[in-house]
Amino acid sequence: MALKVRSVDPEGLAAQYGISSGDEILKINGCRIRDSFDLGYYSSEYQLNILIRTKDGKQRRIKIIRDSMLFLGIEPEPAPIRRCQNKCVFCFVDQMPAGLRQSLYIKDDDYLMSWEHGNYISLTNLSDAEFSRIIDQYISPLYISVHTTDKALRQKMMGYKRDFDIFKTLKRLSRAGISFHTQIVCVPGLNDKVELERTILDLASPELNTLSIGVVPVGLTRFRSHLPELTPFDAHSASLVLSLIDILRRETGSDIIYAADEFFVLADRAIPGRAYYQDYPQAENGIGLLSLLRAGFGRHKEELIRSLDSEGADYLLLHSQAAAKEMGKIAAQISSRLSKASFSARAVRNDFFGPLVTVSGLLTASDILGQHASQPRQTLILPSNMFNVDGYTLDGMDREALTQRLGRKLLLSHPFFEEVS
């Protein structure tokens, strides 16, 4: 397997030495190049002896001396994504209806994407050669889905057949200097209570290079036919999880154990301040987002109020049910300061996925249309994370189409109130 060049920057070293799109990079300094990580890892030397296969199938050797500050300038073709082979009882992809964007049905379990993008991986699908590569090339930190350190229970929850001990594997990685962030998807009746305590204590062990431990509640949609019956968290069980985490943080003296925002919302407990989350290592996992929302509004409040008041419009900010309490406080502050405009906020029910899904990233255009198609004179403000990088909602509608269907002006609130546009 070689790395195929998608494009070459005309200002880079590769272009100067005749490497072009469609070429394949076979080796650098005698080391095989399989993907973009190898390219970056082996191309940092002062002298590069590169073996390529050109578009016409001929092999060519190129010697590059880095006698300038020029970058290499190679954009590789994306490597195939390693797919997950597990059958987790709580898998969210298995709980999605047909007809959505194809990318939403991809179950990735790719260690390079984990290192580069913070995607959580199981480690169960890696070969000995791949573990050796992680160690030899120091691919760290990784983001690892643990769920439980009990060998038999993890196999049951994740549905794999191979003999695999996650705790021993994490110790092996730790001895080699590899660090990792970990997550526990907590399922009532399976890996909560005593099992959760054991897992957290194992992960907090000084034997491991654990950077953070995130505990998140199982996410359940209304599309669970032919799937195992699971129990959702309620106010009582969420409160028990928070109490357990509080106790373990105190007893272990470890401040790397974090509970997801949903637990605080369900238990009707105040969202912690910044000190609890430190540098927010698991924000992408939904841990600390409401704290960041609050802090972001504090930073941008004056600018936001001036911008809204200058338009003199009637604004309705739509948000997730999980953010209702924080957004209510924010809306009250904004409204009290406006002289020309009016401002209110309202939670959107997730009728598409069901009442147990309460986060803004899983809101759909159909729910916006179904609940807020009236009052065309009112300007709607939606969370920008409803839309993917290509500008589409989960159910496939872009901003322009949604605006036309609503028949009213539509603004997007960017993460943590950095911008409303």
Image (cartoon, grey):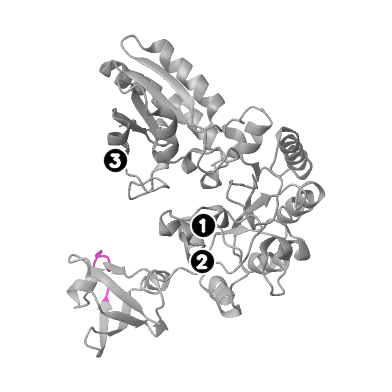
Answer whether residue 124 is visible to the viewer in this image.
yes
Q: Give the residue type at disc 1.
A: Asn
Where is residue 276 drawn, in percent x and y? 62, 36
How many neighbours does mark 3 have within 10 angstroms: few (below 14), some (14-19), or many (20 or more)? few
Question: Considering only vertical position in the picture, is 145 above or below 35?
Answer: above
Would residue 66 be visible to someone looking at this image? Answer: no
Give the amino acid at mark 3.
Ala
Q: Main secondary structure of the magenta part?
A: loop
Q: Which residue is mark 3?
A: 401
Locate residue 47: give its quadrant.
bottom left
Q: First in sequence, mark 3 or 2: give its number.
A: 2
Pick the front one: 118 or 218 = 218
Whether the residues at callouts 2 and 1 have beta carbons within 8 Å, the answer is: yes
Q: CA distance from mark 2 to mark 1?
A: 8 Å
Q: Nearer the viewer, mark 1 or mark 3?
A: 3
Within the image, what quadrant is residue 335 found in? top left
Label 1's element? loop
The label shown at residue 119 is 1
Q: Amino acid at mark 2?
A: Asp
Disc number lying in front (3 or 2): 3
- Out of 122 and 283, give the one closest to the viewer: 122
